[in-house]
Structure formats: C-alpha cells, structure tokens
Image (cartoon, grey):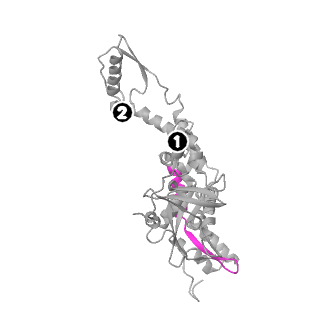
Amino acid sequence: MSLLTRLFRSPDPPEERSVSIADPAALSLFGVTPSLAGVSVSDRTAMGLSAVYRCVSLISGSIASLPLRTVVTQPDGTTQRTTSWLDDPAGPHGVTAFEWVEFLMVSLLLHGNAYFLKVFGGAGQLLALQPLPPQCVGVEVRNGRKLYRVQLESGQSRQLTDAEIVHIPGISLDGVCGVSPITIAKNSLGAAIASERSAARLFSNGLLSSAIVTPEDTLSEEEAAAVKDALSRKIAGEAHAGDVSVINRKLKITPWSVNPADAQFLESRAFAVDEVSRWFGIPPHLLGQTEKQTSFGAGLSEQNRGYAKYTLEPWTRRVEARLTRLLPANRKAEFDFRSLVSPDPETEIRLLIDQVASGLLSLDEARAILNRKPLEKGGHR
C-alpha cells in the first residue's frame, strides 16, 4: 500500500474516477486532433525522441547536480548557509535529494506543473515533500483558492488544499496552472515523431518500400491478394534486404516512392533537432549538432555561463521562490551555481590571489572558497 493510500484511506465508498487536466488523453476524449501530423503526442512518445530525452535529462540533471541549500540572512545583510529539511527534501525514507529535484524538473519540463504532498511531524512542523505524479492531480479554483483533486492507487480521489499540497507551476496562461511544453509543442514534436516512424517503416520494409505491381496476365481479386502476400513475405522486410527472391509470376514491379534526398528526409530530421533545442532552450551543440555554432560565447566556461543564465536560472528562480515560502522568516532556498560556472582551476587561483592582494578577500576567506581550512595562527602566509 502506497504512502498516499495509507494517508487518505477512508471508509467512504469509492468516488467516480476523473481525468486529470494534465493527462494528454483528455484531449482525445473530446476529439481534439493531437497534432497537425496526425500523431498522438504525450510525455512518453515525446521522450522517445532522442532530442527531447536529451533536453529533459540535461536540464533536470544539471539542476539536480547543483547543491540545494538553505541560507539565512544576517543582520549585516550577508547570508550564511544553515540546515533545514531541504537537505533531505523527501525525508529519510523517500527518494534522494538528487532524484527529488530531478523529478521536480521533469514534471515541469513535460507537464508544466510539479506537485508535492506535505509531510508533517508530530508538532506540526514540515518534515518533507512527497512527490506526486502530475497526471494524478487536477486543479480547480473556488472562491479564489486552489483545490487539488488527487487520485490514489485504489481508484479513490481526495480533495486537498494549499495547506497540504505544494504546487510549482511553469509558464502559465491563466495564473493557476502551468502550460505543458509538450502540449504547446505538439505540432513540432508530432512532425518529428512522424518522421521517426516513417524512417522505421522505410527500413522495416526493406527492398520493397512502396511499389506498383503490374501482372502480364489477368488476376482475380483472390489471386492478386495472394501475389501481394507472396511479395510481402519474400521481398519486404529487413530480413530480406539484399536477398534474391524468385516469384513464379510474370510481374512488372515499378517502385513508387520518393527517395530520402528528394523528400529532404535527412534535412527534416536535423531540423526537428533544431526545433526541439529551441523549445527547451538548449544550444544545438549540446544535442550533438557539432556543426552548429553556439552564440553563448567561446570557450567551455563562457558556454556554461550562457547555458546557466538563459536556460537553467529561470527554472531555478521559479523553484527557489516557491520553496522559500515554506521556510521560516529570513531564510531562503537557493541553488549554488558555483560548481557550474566557476572558471578553470588556474584562472580561479589567479583571481583569488589578485583579490587577496587588493584586500577584497582575506587569506582565510580565499582558502574557504577553495574548501581548505584556515591557516593556523602564526602559520606561513
């Protein structure tokens, strides 16, 4: 029995199961065309595209790799790190801190919303946030307040409020829920998925991708069906690619297909990668498009700074603002970007030496930045 089932178990009869507004299947129920390419686009089909998977895993993994810290503001205006439940946000029996942040970002990147169940201690203090699948949560507004309908494994659903649920929305059009990037980008992703399926069919059909068969003698419908079946079994399919086939009929086979060059097949697949990189804000060179030149700057350090500033920081600021509301006064949540944007060791040491020489830093402060202990009193300086 899951945590949610144990928490919300009640003797009431099961309620009628509803469909979450975040579920892409809800569109199909109302006859909405999934995409202009006629392909159904969901989080799973979108993740089947290598570019989408790479973008989602790169952004979520990069942010999950950043230390999530709680800092307290001192009377002099400086901040200092302190401990809080954010050091282990899911609790000792939940997922790890890395997995917690990664799940949060995947929910935002695919569904546009992230939901967590608040776990309280005996004294009413917040202990952890339990991740909730976005597909299992529906949101409505009554009297200016959000109400969350959470569906459980048992088929029951419970209505919760902001006192029990933490909702982190992405880009929103109504100020209530975030917009799913997959839903917004369904036409671009649908075209890319259709291109992948066309490629799969092209290779799976082997020698005979598409053709017109003209017999020299007249065939009945049954005989024509038998000829087609024989051709499909003997010629079509990757198992028969390059094989020699013998057909006991006088047939004229005319290929009826557009070659990949004429269809701009390779160009369209490369363009799909560019489209995905634009949707997620990832420079093409991070998706394996090495012939593309990045405008983030020259050098790995400058590229990391541009990636952190224009792609990662808007996401982390959104998350920090929501988590800070759950902390006591004068405390805030923040992601530490230093490991991502720090220069190479030689440059960093040279900058620290210059700052110590100019009086901006003391020697012990410079050593602390390098994660080294202060010098003993009277030691070599």
- The amino acid at mark 2 is Glu
| Secondary structure beneath label 2 | helix
Residue 238 counted in the magenta span: no
| Residue 71 shown in magenta | yes
Residue 353: x, y in percent? 63, 74
Quarter that holds the C terminus: bottom right
Q: Amino acid at mark 1?
A: Ser
Q: Residue at x 69, y 81 (%)?
A: 75
Q: Is residue 49 left or right of residue 214?
A: right
Q: Nearer the viewer, residue 226 or 287?
A: 226
- Asked whether 39 or 136 is in front, the reply is 136
**Residue in view at x 39 percent, y 26 percent:** 208
Q: Which mark is residue 17?
A: none
Name the residue tied to disc 2: 238
How far apart, in angstroms, are the residues tagged by discs 1 and 2?
34 Å
Residue, disc 1: 28
Q: 217 left or right of 189?
A: left
* Image: magenta residue range: 53-79
Category of crowding for the residue at label 1, using alpha-carbon neighbours closer than 10 angstroms: few (below 14), some (14–19), many (at least 20) = few
- The residue closer to the viewer here, 26 or 376, is 26
